[in-house]
Amino acid sequence: MSCKSPNTHRVSVNLWTVTAAAAITAVATGLGAVPLWFVSRERAEGLARMGSGAAAFLMTAASGVLLWQGVSLGSTSTVAGGLVGALCLLLFRRSVGPHDDLVLGRLRGADALKALVIVAVMTAHSFSEGVGVGVSYGDSNRFGILMTLAIALHNIPEGLAISVVLVPRGATVRTAALWSVFSSLPQPLIAPLAYLFVEQFQVVLPFGLGLAAGAMLWMVVSELLPELRPAAASRQLRT
């Protein structure tokens, strides 16, 4: 166990600071849904294909950043995490199955399943971001603030990636924003633990970054890119 100070009061203050900082990054994810407030329901329904393309681009870019960060910390652990992340999502998708009767709010069947998968992927991704916030505050407060701002800004397009998949399939913008924030809830839960156990979490951070990247890349290849085909897009608009 590694605490940054023997002074109990100081540790408590720092823990609250870290938790509050991670909570800010989580709330920032909901801002990604804001642009969709200015898009009509009819227009959103016609953006299903474009939304899948935008989400695929954003998630691929985020995965590249995670892999770059992970490899700089430990290439073997990052690659192992990526393979495990892709495998976990593959097993999760197969265990869920087609489930045409699945209901998630206003979403039904395949749309509900896709929403469930993308929220699961982004939630898994948030664990590594929570670790990043906590570890950064274990180094110094200044670095922690910079990391908080960086992750908060990074989370906005992640919220957009979730929203452009959910809204064209029938979810409201408010619901998409709430699901976006929900996907980032691991950040304020994990960050304080990562702050307390800096050395231990630094060891697993490359694996966690690879895990998140592998899961997102699997989502892009298996769920989002197939929807860019014209036939797939026309099927979405008919359902």
Image (cartoon, rainbow, N blue to C red):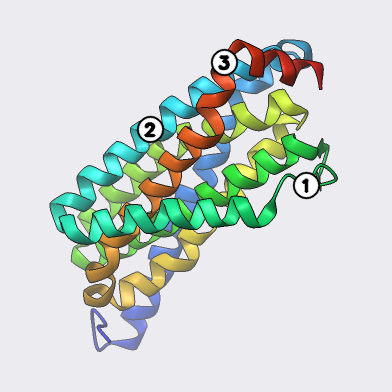
Helix, strand or loop at label 1? It is loop
Q: Is residue 188 above or below residue 103?
A: below
Amino acid marked by disc 3: Arg
Helix, strand or loop at label 2? It is helix
* Dot 1 alpha-carbon crowd within 10 angstroms: few under 14, some 14 to 19, many 20 or more: few
Q: Are marks 3 and 2 in contact (CB under 8 Å)?
A: no
Q: Nearer the viewer, residue 230 or 67?
A: 230
Q: How many marks?
A: 3
Residue sitting at 17 percent across and 50 percent down?
71
* Dot 2 alpha-carbon crowd within 10 angstroms: few under 14, some 14 to 19, many 20 or more: some
Residue 66's mark? none
Q: Quadrant of residue 100?
A: top right
Q: Are marks 1 and 3 in contact (CB under 8 Å)?
A: no
Q: Nearer the viewer, residue 10 or 109?
A: 109
Q: Is residue 136 above or below residue 170?
A: below
Amino acid marked by disc 1: His
Q: Quadrant of the C terminus?
A: top right
Residue sitting at 50 percent across and 41 percent down?
28
Q: Position of residue 237 (x, y in %)?
A: 75, 16
Helix, strand or loop at label 3? It is loop
Q: Which residue is mark 3?
A: 229
Residue sitting at 35 percent across and 62 percent down?
131
Q: Position of residue 192 (x, y in %)?
A: 40, 70
Q: Quadrant of the N terminus?
A: bottom left
172 sits to left or right of 53: right
CA gap, disc 1 and disc 2: 27 Å
Q: Is residue 83 above or below residue 46?
A: below
Q: Which residue is mark 1?
A: 99
Q: Which residue is mark 2?
A: 60
Residue sitting at 40 percent across and 65 percent down?
191
